[in-house]
């Protein structure tokens, strides 16, 4: 491997600490054990994938892709999360990670892939447009904790 070469590979359980650290940069902090559990739950699933980007032996980014079946739209891929370490942005890492998820989705027979980007992440909007994504709509996202409602 040459200096600054970007290697994209599937995430492994042993990557949890670095994936967790990068997740914190994205605004979703998680400790190493929590991230290890999340990676373990995703490992082996055919409808989910996590790739990491490695440069000079260090994980410098990750992407999470998923397949969803929607009643209104059919099967579709989604980029559920993407982060590249500060200092490694604009080096092709994000583009390579997106391409990896797009290839994964295409192999699964999916014809389209979507991504949601928070309105406050203004730096990501031109990135997605540069790699071929078109803004379709603006929406509000709602969430409810389920807690003990089982």
Image (cartoon, rainbow, N blue to C red):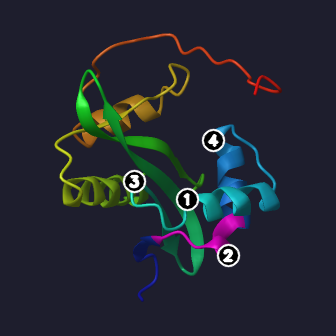
Where is 72 relative to 98, above or below? above
Label 1–label 4 contact, CB within 8 A: no
4 vs 3, front mark: 3
Tell me where residue 121 appears, x and y as whole percent: 53, 28
Relative image position of residue 43 (x, y in whole percent): 54, 66
Helix, strand or loop at disc 4? helix
Q: Give the crowd class for mark 2: few <14, some 14-19, many >=20 residues within 10 Å.
A: few
For label 1, the residue is: 42
**Mark with earlier residue (1, 3):** 1
Q: Is residue 15 visible?
A: yes
Secondary structure found at label 2: helix
In this view, the residue farthest toward the front is 150
Q: Nearer the viewer, mark 2 or mark 3?
A: 3
Q: Determine which of the numbered discs, if any, sits on residue 14 in the image.
A: 2
Q: Can you give x and y, in whole percent of width and height, for residue 93 in the image?
A: 42, 59
Residue underneath mark 4: 26
């Amino acid at each position: 491997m040459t200096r600054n070469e970007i290697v994209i590979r599937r995430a492994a359980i042993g990557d949890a600490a670095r994936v967790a650290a990068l997740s914190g940069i994205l605004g979703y902090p998680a400790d190493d054990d929590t991230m290890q559990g999340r990676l373990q739950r995703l490992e082996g699933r055919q409808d989910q994938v996590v790739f990491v980007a490695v440069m000079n032996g260090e994980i410098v980014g990750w992407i999470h892709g998923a397949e969803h079946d929607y009643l209104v739209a059919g099967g579709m891929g989604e980029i559920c999360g993407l982060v590249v370490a500060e200092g490694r942005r604009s080096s092709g890492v994000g583009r390579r990670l997106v391409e990896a998820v797009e290839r994964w989705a295409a192999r699964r027979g999916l014809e389209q892939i979507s991504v949601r980007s928070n309105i406050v992440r203004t730096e990501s909007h031109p990135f997605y447009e540069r790699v071929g994504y078109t803004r379709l709509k603006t929406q509000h996202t709602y969430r409810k904790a389920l807690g003990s409602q089982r």
